[in-house]
Image (tube, grey):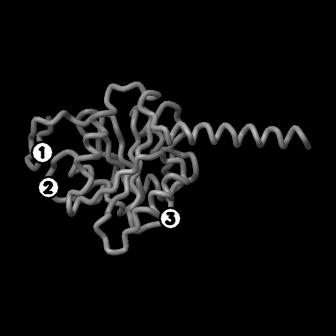
Amino acid sequence: MSSNPHMSHSTQPALADFVLVGAVHCGKTALMQALLGDKGEVFKTQAAIFHDGHVIDTPGEFIGRRSYYGALLSTIVDVSTIVYLQPANSVIFALPAGLLHVYPNKRVVGVISKIDLPDADVATVSRLLYDNTIPTPHFATSVVTGSGVAELRDYLISLQGKPIDAALSRSEKEHQHSDKEKKRGGNEKKSAA
């Protein structure tokens, strides 16, 4: 249990074994605090913050600067679930394709943050996540209104203790199948040449 005086202590199961990643200002720390029940002020994350239960908040620079990709990969190596945040008002996907899938046997969960903003476009951002190999379901959240936070928390808790393959969504399995087909097609083209 955290010694943070701003934490609300409840009887809900504890979150465990995930990392939040996303670009600068996408709302990672605010969402982490909402998930953990921390009512304190939100500050800019300058380095990875390790919470109880192997729950990790990362700085946006891990995504935004190529020179920090090694730090990102080192941080995610020992967790089972990577939670990627994409703001609802941004159609720029900040990561190179496949970076979150470097390690096998990791779940990647897509979260659309800041859905309360007037220029939010949840459908477009959900498609952006899917097109960049982040499987459904995508959780639309707002820490301002609280929308989607409890559902995301419940989902993350439901993943705990499950074997990775058992937790793969149909969408993720379709992505894996599609990737295999693309590779197979590429090899056939090389053979035909």
Which quadrant of the view contains residue 53? top left
Dot 3 or dot 1: first in sequence order is 1
Instruction: Please report the residue visible at 32 percent of the width from the left and 74 percent of the height from the top.
Output: 118
* Quadrant housing the N terminus: top left
**Badges 2 and 1: C-beta atoms under 8 Å apart?**
yes
Q: Label 2: state its secondary structure.
A: loop
Q: Amino acid at mark 3?
A: Ile
Q: Amino acid at mark 2?
A: Gly
Residue lying at the far front in this picture: please name it: 170
Observer-nearest residue: 99 or 143? 143
Residue 40's mark? 2
**Badges 3 and 1: C-beta atoms under 8 Å apart?**
no
Instruction: Please report the residue visible at 47 percent of the width from the left and 64 percent of the height from the top.
Output: 124
Q: Amino acid at mark 1?
A: Asn
Percent coordinates x, y for residue 156 in the rendering: 31, 39
Dot 2 or dot 1: first in sequence order is 1
Q: Is residue 12 positioned above or below 136 on the image? A: above
Circle 1 residues within 10 Å: few <14, some 14–19, many ≥20: few
Find the distance from the CA under tag 2 to the CA under tag 1. 9 Å
Circle 3 residues within 10 Å: few <14, some 14–19, many ≥20: few
Residue 4's mark? 1
Find the distance from the CA under tag 2 to the CA under tag 3. 30 Å
Q: Is residue 169 positioned above or below 30 on the image? A: above
Q: Is residue 25 positioned above or below 161 on the image? A: below
